[in-house]
Amino acid sequence: MSNPSPAQVATPDLDMSRTMPSGAKPMIRFSGICKAFGSLVVLDDLDLDIAPAEKVALIGPSGSGKSTLLRVLMTLERPDKGSIEIDGAPLWHMPKNGGLVPADGRHLREMRKNVGMVFQQFNLFPHMSVLRNVTEAPVHVLGIDKDEADARARDLLDMVGLRDKVNHYPAQLSGGQQQRVAIARALAMRPRVMLFDEVTSALDPETVGEVLSVIRDLAHEHNLTMLMVTHQMGFAREFADRVCFFYQGRILEQGPPDRLFNDPQNERTQAFLRAVLES
Amino acid sequence: MIWDWDYALEVLPKLLDALIVTVQAALVGFVIALVLGMLIALARRSGRLWLSVPVGALAEFIRSTPLLVQLYFLFFVLPGFGIQTSPFITGVIGLGVHYATYTAEVYRAGLDAVPRGQWEAAWALDFSPLHTFRSIILPQALPPVVPVLGNYLIAIFKDTPLLSAITVLEMMQVAKIEGSETFQYLEPLTIVGLLFLIVSLISAVLIGRLENHLGVLRRI
Ligand SMILES: Nc1ncnc2c1ncn2[C@@H]1O[C@H](COP(=O)(O)OP(=O)(O)OP(=O)(O)O)[C@@H](O)[C@H]1O
Ligand SMILES: [Mg+2]
């Protein structure tokens, strides 16, 4: 190996890209992801590996590309460059004639089954009961028998503490309750990866806790890989195995929460944490 | 001029027969407008420019030219291309196509009002495009625009006298024929007006009920 550059010597455990528990095969691998909206570069040659069942919190200033990273993984946005692999299989490409070609709709649909997402605005279907919100996709997408889907939906709603609300409509629920239904709805598809994009930002302060506690339980009890964009540093600290600090479409610094929050190396991380912890 | 009851009662049955033709023309025209309008709205939303641009341009053209001209065009020009149909069918197609360009705008407004997050949630849950549209988007897009669509039904109904220009025997045409035979126009035309009024009022009540029903559905 050639001599390490001085910067690397100065920050030995400050890996700029793919820090993952060594040895594991990544559940998700982002390689050289670029995304721009017009002239605005939102993701800038981003690399990131995430281990199976790892819980990763994404933090950083507004506009730094955190949501966009989740959205390209959910296939809501198409990256301009780079590749994403889910459990070794390419997401935006598919094998053909020994090479890789851009994925078609069918491949994207198949790959998307691995990933579930919870949105800031809940996005429950307002014309469906709580139960139907949770069973609609298992029945119509996975082809699960309706009774079985019902039973499973009830279990999930039980888990998020909403067993008695199955026949309600979203408009009859508080924000926190709606968000818990949205979590149950995403889980009903049995994804291997769950994405949470500022899922408590639209909530009244008094209902934030109930949603976080559901996510906390999920993190403990399930073998899910979880990526969470959050502005709540306290929750990121207790929830995450690893925290990634985004800045202008790159991950400037990452590491275990204790290290990153107590001893940030990069001065932009320091400035960001100072700003959010003071507010 | 005084009202002639005997004459009025004599023309009434003929006008009621013609009312059936009028109502049929309006209803069939409306169904065409509802279906074709949705197709136009979908074509215009499509990302495929070869589809959205020509359909959009044609719809704009039809919407901004008079229905009467279009009816004449269908009636006198199409047979020249070897397309022969009855005046009724020609008229109903004319009404339906013309009003489809209006209902397309209504659908568009309804579809645009469904938040983007609904499409994204459906996408994330892996619904097929058809299921997304039919079970997630349409049930949210349609109820708010039902009153506007209903108003177009009444508008179509009130435009049916234009079909008399292409010899369809709807109420107006029958009233004119009757009047021209006896030179008594007051009774047939008055009856036609009253019948229009009655049917419009009934439709308005029915549409109002449907609207209430949908409103209740949305609020539960
Ligand atoms: N569809 C789009 N079209 C144009 N610009 C977009 C689009 N989506 C996102 N952007 C822009 O890209 C930038 C990065 O957006 P992104 O949502 O990824 O940031 P973020 O880190 O999640 O920020 P926040 O903390 O505010 O949610 C923002 O400036 C945003 O305005
Ligand atoms: Mg965001």
Image (cartoon, coloured by chain):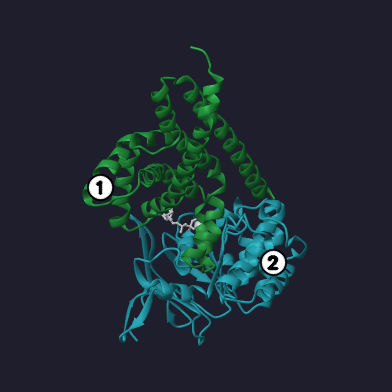
Chain colours: A cyan, B green
Label 1 CB-ligand 1 distance < 8 A: no
| Residue A235 rendering spot, x and y as whole percentages | 64, 64
Which one is nearer the viewer's eye here, A45 or A159?
Answer: A159
As helix, strand or loop, the secondary structure at mark 1 comes to: helix
Residue highlighted by disc 1: B79
A99 relative to A223 in the view: left or right = left
Task: Please tell me in which quadrant of the rendered image residue A47 appears.
Answer: bottom left
Residue highlighted by disc 2: A214
As helix, strand or loop, the secondary structure at mark 2 comes to: helix
| Residue A69 rendering spot, x and y as whole percentages | 46, 65
Task: Please tell me in which quadrant of the rendered image residue B71 appears.
Answer: top left
Task: Please tell me in which quadrant of the rendered image residue A160 appears.
Answer: bottom right
The residue mark sitting in front, 2 or 1, is 1
How much space separates mark 2 and mark 1, taking CA atoms?
Answer: 70 Å
A237 relative to B70 in the view: left or right = right
Looking at the image, residue B100 lies above or below residue A135: above
Residue A3 appears in the rendering: no
Q: Residue at x 47, y 39 (%)?
A: B22
| Residue A9 rendering spot, x and y as whole percentages | 42, 76
Amino acid at dot 1: Pro
Output the chain of dot 1. Answer: B
| Residue A212 rendering spot, x and y as whole percentages | 67, 63
Which one is nearer the viewer's eye here, B198 or B45?
Answer: B198
Which one is nearer the viewer's eye here, B76 or A51?
Answer: B76
